[in-house]
Amino acid sequence: MSRTTVHLAVYDTFADWETGHTTAHLTQNGFTVRTVGATTGPVTTMGGLRVLPDLALGDLVPDDSALLILTGASLWDTGDELAPFAAKARDFLAAGVPVAAICGATAGLAREGLLDDRAHTSAVPFYLDATGYAGGAHYEEADAVTDGDLITAGPTEPVALAREVLARLGVYDGPRLDAWYRLFHDSDQAAYEILAS
């Protein structure tokens, strides 16, 4: 594997719509997306899709990856079943490999202590406060926030999450990144001309 491989965590109830823009545009720009589950057994998304993970979480090492993506899922709020994914995010950040988390995955990172000292966002502040985390002072009211290698986004912001990932991985920057976001977030047809040039 190379540093053009991105890993998408998959688990039962994961919110499959939250990473569509991210994975599609990474794939179209030379990245390979591999799915990683707790095991290699099938999982079922919130949308009812069955996904067979490419590898098990225990086999994932940061050196083989350009990015780990964690989506929301009902399971983030019902117990500790997904805690190993947050622990893996800790390994990635410690190794200097980016992590992108959206929706409920931000609560998992909060429980792991990964938001205590980093700027971040989520659905609403009190959602993360309920985890007992110590990072409330670093919460930002924004569609998505990048703090070094950590990207966070609220549940209604899959396009903003993609924007931050595309910027962090150097897929688009400057006017092209802005145009991409305006096209897919705001349906700004004028932005298409910039991307097409």
Image (cartoon, rainbow, N blue to C red):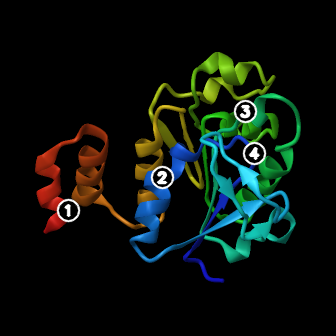
89, above or below 131, in the image: below
Which residue bears the numbered disc 2?
A: 20
Pick whichever of labels 2 and 1 is earlier in the sequence: 2
Identify which amino acid the numbered label 2 is placed on: Gly
Which residue bears the numbered disc 3?
A: 74
Which residue bears the numbered disc 4?
A: 12
Tell me the distance, in whole angstroms, between the alpha carbons under discs 1 and 3: 36 Å
Image quadrant where residue 39 sits: bottom right
Identify which amino acid the numbered label 4 is placed on: Asp
Pick whichever of labels 3 and 2 is earlier in the sequence: 2
Identify which amino acid the numbered label 1 is placed on: Leu
107, above or below 176, in the image: above
User: Residue 137's x, y, as percent?
Assistant: 64, 24
**Which labelled disc corresponds to residue 195?**
1
Mark 3, residues whose alpha carbon is within 10 Å: few (<14), some, or many (≥20)?
some
Tell me the distance, in whole angstroms, between the alpha carbons under discs 4 and 1: 36 Å
User: Residue 147's x, y, as percent?
Assistant: 56, 46
